[in-house]
Structures are given as C-alpha cells and as structure tokens.
Amino acid sequence: MRTVYVNGEYLPETEARVSIFDRGFLMADGVYEVTSVLDGKLIDFDGHARRLERSLRALDMAMPVSEEELLAIHRELVARNGIDEGMVYLQVTRGAPGDRDFVFPDPDETPQTLVLFTQDKPGLADSPAAKKGIRIISIDDIRWGRRDIKTVQLLYPSMGKMMAKAAGVDDAWMVEDGLVTEGTSNNAYIVKGNRIITRGLSNDILHGITRAAVLRFAREAQMEVEERAFTIDEAKAADEAFITSASTFVMPVVEIDGVALGGGSPGKVAPRLREIYLEESRKAAI
C-alpha cells in the first residue's frame, strides 16, 4: 500500500484525511507541483521548489516548510514507496478554517494543508508515445488570467483532455485571440527550419520548469530559439511540433487538427531535445 504525507505525518493512503472545509476543496484555493523521478532521483527539484514559492507568494501564502524539509519529504516518500520511475505530487492549500467563507482565514489561526503522494510510472523515460508522436486538436482558451500561478483550478484543462479524447486524439492546445497559449498540461512549441518557436513568458502561460531546461539545452546545442506567440495555421505549416512537461519531458506532436506534420512522424529536433534533456537531467538529479 502506498505511503502518503499529510501535514507532518507519513500514513497509509487509506488513512489519509483532509477536512471537508479545506479551501483547496471548497475554493480551489491552493497550488501544486509535480516532480518527476528517474532512477530513484528527483528531476529539477530546485526549479519546482522555486516555482512553488512563486505561486504561493502570488496568492499571499507562505511556504509551509523549508525547501530543505520539502526535499527530505520528497526523498522519504520515494524511498518508502520504492519509486524508480514516477512522480511526486505536492499540494499546498490555505487550510481548513472550520467553515466556508470567501474571505481568507487568518494564517496565524488556520494552518496550511500540505499533502504529497507518489505515482509509480515504470517506463516513464522510455515512453512509446515519444517514438511515434502524439496527435492534438485546438480548443478555445477560456481560463482565468493568471495561468502563471500553478493553482489546483484544473477543470478546463481536464475538459480539454476530454475534448481531445472525444475527438480520438491525445491532447489539445488552447488558443486565445487566434494565438496558441499552451497545451492542457504542457508548454507548446513548433519548429521551422532550425528555429524553435514557443510563446514567451507572461501571465498567459505556466512558466514550465521543463520548458526552461529544454530551451537552455537547445541554446547550448546551437539551436535557434524564438520566444513569441504563433497561430494554429502557423503550427500546421511547421516542420515539427512538440510539447514539454515534467511528466512527458519532450514529446513530439505529429498531427494538429487533422493535419500531419513531417509526414506524420517525429522529426529530428524534438527527439534530439528529449535525448539531451533526459541525459542532462539524470546527471543533475538529486
């Protein structure tokens, strides 16, 4: 049985409890992070910890524990659950004040809720989808205006995943004012010539930790990177496309709204970036 972490305790998952008055449950008043595990080690942990702190600060919440303690909890859960390849999910909410109210509770009187659990994903790095690529559709982006905060408000991204499933494809890219923002749970890229194009950082997209690492590796490999918005039509005419996230690393996209890219097979850039990312991330894992 899986061991989870709830507010300072390591518990069997069947014994884990959070109050019905928790603001994460009632108001989606919380943030989360997902850190991948390869070879029993954490990938990009420092980046996830920094983004967690940024998300909390944007919502006027404090870090519930120190970064050192957070790392220790991650490592303990990985060890207790014997995770070789998988993920650690972390969630922080404003806590359970004992009743429902739109007004934030006093943080001195209402402690935050901190929950972590692992997900065992054997074969995460050797995903069959990475070899053949994924197919996507485009959907309207109707989310709130602060997508850069990694909140637990994931209803519309979940709906987007279901729209993709209903269309018989793998995922969806969201479009606002004619321009691609991001995928349902990932950052979006196209490749034209030797140029990688992806939307620049702003409140409109999540500041992906994998995104930052992949773009750094791309520049180090002498690939040209252009951070700007692009249209779906531009994407359909691209040589390649791909997504990045903590759970998919670098994943080629081979079809957009029924239009095949690169003959319907992954090109050269995305697979090479995936190879570099996995190699470098494994070296730096802790």
Image (cartoon, helix red, strand yellow):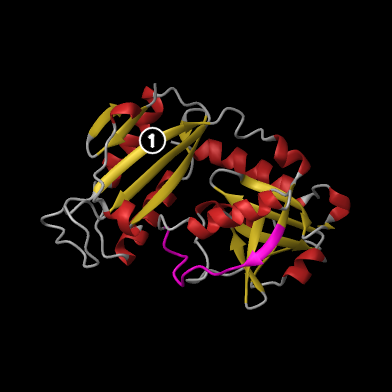
Q: Secondary structure at mark 1?
A: strand
Rate crowding at label 1 as few (under 14), some (14 to 19) or many (20 or more) other CA atoms within 10 Å.
many
Name which quarter of the figure residue 188 lies in.
bottom right
- The answer to whether residue 12 of the structure is visible from this angle is no
Residue drawn where x is 47% and y is 33% of the image: 119
Figure label count: 1
Looking at the image, the residue that sits furthest to the bottom is: 177
Residue drawn where x is 28% and y is 44% of the image: 114
Name which quarter of the figure residue 183 lies in.
bottom right
Residue 56 on image: x %, y %: 32, 59
Q: Which residues are magenta?
A: 137-150
In this rendering, would 48 be left or right of 61?
A: right
147 is within the stretch colored magenta: yes
- Residue beneath disc 1: 117
Residue drawn where x is 85% and y is 54% of the image: 262
- The answer to whether residue 34 of the structure is visible from this angle is yes
